[in-house]
Image: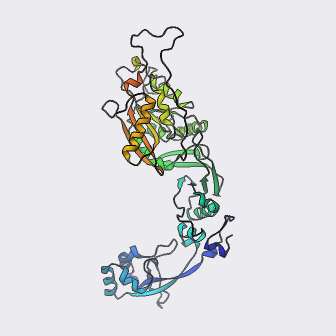
Amino acid sequence: TLSTESLSGVKEDVFTTIDKDLFIKKITVIALQVQPKTCHKVLSLVKPYTIRKTGIRNIVADPGDETGKGRLVLLNEETIKTRDDVESCLPSDIVEAIKREEIRVVEHEISLSYDNMSQESIMRKLLPVSIGEIPSAFETVGHIAHFNLRDELLPYKHIIGQVILDKNAHIKTVVTKLGNIETKFRTFPMEVIAGKQEFDVRVKEHNVTFEFNFADVYWNSRLQEEHRIIVSRFRKNEVIADAMCGIGPFAVPAAIKGCNVYANDLNPKCYKYLLRNVEKNKVTSKVSCFNTDARDFIRLACKGDFPSKIEGQKEKTVFPQHIVMNLPAAALSFLDVFPGCFDRNLWQNKPLPMVHCHCFSSGKTQEERRDNVISRAENYLGCSLKPNDKNEVEVRYVRDVAPNKFMMCLHFRVPEQVAFAFEDPEGEGEAEGEKTTPDPKRPKVEFIENSP
């Protein structure tokens, strides 16, 4: 437990519990003395200026009233510290009402404890004064609080974790990220700093339920709005090919919307939870699940080789209207699969698919970030991606990831010169043993540090 000396800033993190009795103290607050008949009228006037402490009511019995009926309206002790502050800090119309009703301004003593304090005020009490920014923001994944603690906070990680558990009833496990996302499955090392070693979670997002193990797969609750935006671009009965689908945050909502979805992820554990989430949300008839390399999956999509799950469709060939590539650290490098990947005879009179490709970018302005994305995409596609009516190019900001690092989404319709590249213009075909369709060069895929 924490010693009394620790309250001025602990030197090292060796505590698994916090002695809450050390936080008990008495403070004097300013109050308005009112009678029951005027209590709620007065409260409605001054409510924005009343005390705001967890577990402390802003109306209490007046201990100085012999009848036992009198009440005190407690004011915010942080802004109104003395009786004179009532007149100087409250709006003039409220001050006039207090005088008109002949309401007395009095002092009142209350007891505060650990339970009444905010997590920020507790941490400020426990952590060294040299810690500038108190850790308060964290990602919530089911019952898990996920931190990315700065190096200076790591010596105090267990204290931070315990405070988060105490102050957030729905949190049962607190973890901190130990390293960058550097694996091909987008997972990262983490440490439990408080609570249970329990990573199986259930998350509800836009009325869709997802179940998964947070340690085994990639999930980011901050992308909830991005999931909605992408799915909003799909129409009922359209065919969606999700090449890097994870546990299904795009695929499952799209299927619920009425789309016919082909979803793939290389991570076997993502595939496991994808199957579970498809079944859990009752869309097994709308989703075909794959566990293969994204390039191989995209080739199937471009060649129309998906098995048809479309009700009433007898032909084998399935043509996707959208291809989703949600692997920000590397998705752009997978664009090299598109040149020459389409058969003109199959796609004749059919619109080529829209591609939705997430990536990271940098730059001081939105224009610089957009140009950075376009330039890299053009390098892999081997053609220009200038915005026009045919390829419908758009680069959209998604969110900040780190200083000068931004998540973006590139939307474009596959250009014909890319889709049908390397075609034999004379129709002579290839001589036996001779290959006229070169494989595009594939730069080495490198995962960018500090991925979200």
Residue 206 visible in the shown view = no
Residue at screen point 64% across, 53% down: 191
| Rendering quarter of residue 36 | bottom left
Name the residue nearer the viewer: 237 or 46: 46
Q: Residue at x 36, y 19 (%)?
A: 348
Q: Tell me where residue 378 sits by quadrant.
A: top left
The image shows residue 8, relative to residue 218, as above or below, that is: below
Residue 262 image offset from top left, x and y in percent: 49, 31
Image: 300 above or below 249: above
Choose between 86 and 127: the one closer to the eye. 127
Q: In screen coordinates, is 101 left or right of 360?
A: left
Taking the image as shown, residue 8 lies to the left or right of residue 110, namely right
Q: In this view of the protein, can residue 130 be seen by the observer?
A: yes
Q: Residue at x 43, y 79 (%)?
A: 75
Tell me if 299 is positioned left or right of 176 in this view: left
Task: Name, please, the residue furthest toward the bottom.
Answer: 66
x and y percentages locating residue 42 in the rendered image: 37, 79
For the residue pair 316 and 127, the one nearer the viewer reads as: 127
Quarter of the picture holding the N terminus: bottom right
